[in-house]
Image (spheres, grey):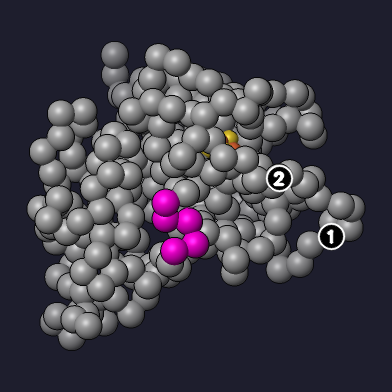
Amino acid sequence: MNNLKVTIDGKSIEVPPGTTILQAARMIGENYPPAMCYYTPLKETGGKCRVCLVKVTQGSEANPRPMPKLVASCLTRVEHGMVIENETSPEVLEARKGVVEFLLINHPLDCPVCDQAGECDLQNLSYKHGTESTRYEEGRREFDKIDLGENIQLHMTRCILCYRCVYTADQLTNKRVHGVINRGDVSEISTYIQNAIDNDFSGNIIDVCPVGALTDKKYRFKQRVWFSKPFYAHRECDKCKGEAVAWVKNNDVIRVTARKNKFGEVLDFICNNCRFEHKNMNDWTIGEPYEMDNDSVITTNKYKVLDHSPAVNVDAKFVSE
Ligand code: SF4
Ligand code: FES
């Protein structure tokens, strides 16, 4: 079948049939819509958070009428001749503000004391698409923190019900013991009768969680993430590829996570053995500094430009301590 031509914010690209608007926008590579629930490595994700809304001003070449309302770009497939407005549409930007406001209704505004600060997708999203103040005066939902076994802690107040952790448990393991219970504003992530989430790949739910709802109990509050340095790290492992990121502080590995792409999606899920049980520098072959989005607070003051050009940063290395 022929490729389909789609135009997003004035830039055109040809994509294979079945491509969604979000994927096409990511292929163009500039100003793609944000995504808080869609996650490429996990099947059937998307359609939960609505931050990826875009305006379809022309449905297709054959049927050029605009779509009557904004659509979720992670679920809507491209048609030949489709024209889309993302960041060029004031209506889309206004709608996104509203979605961020909704996501923050029950989310505590306590980034300075949250373990996810510095690598929280919701924090980044609200900086880019949110408003400076809140209109919400009602009480927020409150939950006790729950230990999901020895490695993971759930703080439900921070959960935005994106379902990524549920799909991760479903698709990586054969015995998911947690999910979303109840409906509407009483929905919550739960193991129902407070089970431990206990399987070899359970730690990946920490990496896919876009907020600070699921955190690593062995790392939690040990360190602000921007005070450590991430490195590509590898070890021989019989359960996973052993390709991870070692977060190093003063020559100690203080945390191990999976590697992610520039959209914040895990490239290779890692096992709990690599993640939780190998915290010595000698356990790992430590490689280059881990490439990160330069907008991240984690990279602040960590990289220097070797050719002294403010525009070029491809050879950036860690500033030595
Ligand atoms: S705990 Fe995290 S990953 Fe799971 S549904 Fe809530 S926000 Fe999403
Ligand atoms: S990313 Fe599309 S609805 Fe969440």
- Pick the front one: 142 or 28: 142
| Left or right: 27 as drawn, with respect to 97 | left
Secondary-structure class at tag 2: loop
Q: What kind of residue is marked 2?
A: Asp
On whether ligand 2 comes within 8 Å of the CB at mark 1, the answer is no
The quarter holding residue 288 reads bottom left
Q: What residue is rendered at 62% in x and 28% in y?
A: 194
Furthest residue to the front?
A: 150
Determine if the magenta segment contains residue 219.
yes
Give the residue furthest to the right.
Answer: 138
Say which residue appears at 62% left-offset and 40% top-offset.
146
Q: Position of residue 9 (x, y in %)?
A: 48, 49
Q: In this view, does 140 lie above or below 39?
A: below
Depth check, mark 1 against mark 2: the one in front is 2
Any magenta on residue 275? no
Q: How crowded is mark 1: few (under 14 residues within 10 Å), some or many (20 or more)?
A: few
Q: Is residue 6 visible?
A: no
Q: What stretch of residues is rendered in magenta?
A: 218-222
On the image, the x and y values in percent for residue 163 come to 56, 30
Q: In which quarter of the image is the N terminus?
A: top left
User: On residue 144, which mark appears?
Assistant: 2
Q: Position of residue 41 (x, y in %)?
A: 36, 30
**Toward the viewer: 190 or 166?**
190
Distance of label 1 from label 2 (alpha carbons): 25 Å
Front residue of 262/170: it is 170
Mark 1, residue position = 135
Of label 1 and label 2, which has the lower sequence position? 1
Q: Residue at x 10, y 53 (%)?
A: 285
Q: Where is residue 313 in the image (x, y as percent from the top left)?
A: 22, 72
The C terminus lies in quadrant = bottom left
Query: Amino acid type of disc 1?
Result: Arg
